[in-house]
Image: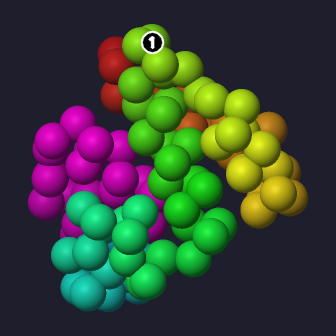
Amino acid sequence: MSPLDPSCNDGCHSGKHTTHARKEGETEQRLCALAAWQESPLFNNTERAVLTLTKEITHVSSHGVTEATYQACVEELNNVKLLLTDYFSVFCWRAA
């Protein structure tokens, strides 16, 4: 789910992102609920941690990544450094 969310945070709901998500097995129900991922029971704690991180990284120049978000990812994920590298790569690629 997370590859789709940065574009949603930017207000862009590109068909290429939803098409990719569907090919990867995402359901229409979860795609429709993505706008309310923080409250939706369709997303687990790990997904919420990653979505929060994605949102903060998307706006890293103005807000940065909070310690609380980082700690939530450390608790939920085994290799947060790999995840951070991946998301910064995506962010930098999108900004180019």
5 left or right, relative to 82 = left
Decide: is 86 above or below 48: above
Q: Position of residue 24 (x, y in %)?
A: 42, 77
Q: Residue at x 49, y 54 (%)?
A: 51
**Seen in the image, is 48 located left or right of residue 26?**
right
Residue 76 figure quarter: bottom right
Task: Say whether residue 14 is magenta.
Answer: yes
Q: Position of residue 45 (x, y in %)?
A: 62, 70
Residue at 63% across, 30% down: 66
Which residue carries the number 1 mark?
A: 61
On screen, residue 64 above or below 74 = above
Q: Is residue 82 visible?
A: no
Q: Is residue 94 visible?
A: yes
Which image quarter holds the C terminus? top left
Q: Which residues are magenta?
A: 1-20
The residue lying at 78 percent from left, 44 percent from top is 71
Q: Is residue 90 above or below residue 3?
A: above
Relative to residue 81, is residue 83 drawn left or right? Answer: left
Quadrant where the N terminus lies? bottom left
In the rendered image, the residue lying farthest to the top is 61
Above or below residue 76? Residue 91 is above
Residue in front for this viewpoint, 48 or 5: 48
Name the one closer to the observer, 96 or 42.
42
Task: Answer with the quarter of the image where residue 49 lies.
Answer: bottom right
Q: Secondary structure at mark 1?
A: loop
Q: Is 17 or 80 nearer to us in this picture? A: 80
Residue visible at 15% across and 41% down? 11
Crowding around mark 1 (Cα neighbors within 10 Å: few <14, some 14 to 19, many 20+) is: few
Q: Amino acid at mark 1?
A: Ser
Does 65 lie within the magenta span?
A: no
